[in-house]
Image (tube, helix red, strand yellow):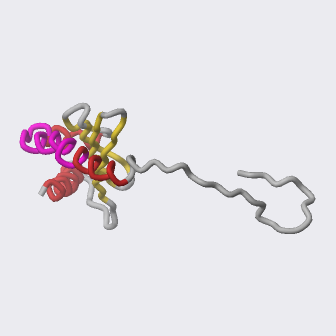
Amino acid sequence: TVALTALLMVLLTSVVQGRATPENYLYQVRQECYAFNGTQRYLNRQIYNREEFVRFDSDVGEYRAVTELGRPTAEYWNSQKDILEENRAVVDRVCRHNYELDEAVTLQRRVQPRVNVSPSKKGPLQHHNLLV
């Protein structure tokens, strides 16, 4: 329901501002979790035609407009306490939970890598090989 509300807000904002909805447009919601030094961070980024216009950042705790287009959306979502609480809880409910699941499979498996370096061309070498 949040995504549908977001889509309607974007479409209604365009109409209210006197702009017609483009025939072909792209609306994206990107939800990102970051883990660094034992801390977790959640971003919910709303993107319209390749331009991020509003974002929720768990470090801030509310939506912030990234462009002028995002101002009405940020104001609306910040007035909806249930939406804010739901987004604030994502850090523990989703990010931390998934990190703990992935940690057991990835971060705890520490194996020294084995590397074998050899020239890509066989035969007489006129130049020294360059490893990139």
Q: Is residue 18 left or right of residue 1?
A: right
Would you identify the image quadrant in which residue 5 lies? bottom left
Image position, residue 90 (x, y; %): 19, 45
- Classify 116 as above or below 37: below
Would you identify the image quadrant in which residue 84 lies? top left
Would you identify the image quadrant in which residue 126 lies? bottom right
Residue appearing at x 90%, y 61% in the figure: 125
Of residues 6 and 123, the one drawn nearer to the viewer in this rendering: 123
**Which contiguous range is marked in magenta?**
78-95
Residue appearing at x 89%, y 55% in the figure: 127
Location of the N terminus (image quadrant): bottom left
- Inspect this view and state whether residue 76 appears: no
Magenta highlight on residue 49: no
Image position, residue 101 (x, y; %): 27, 52
Image position, residue 130 (x, y; %): 79, 52
* Secondary structure character of the magenta stretch overall: helix
Of residues 2 and 112, the one drawn nearer to the viewer in this rendering: 112
Residue appearing at x 36%, y 33% in the figure: 37
- Classify 48 as above or below 57: below
Residue appearing at x 71%, y 51% in the figure: 132
Of residues 84 and 19, the one drawn nearer to the viewer in this rendering: 84
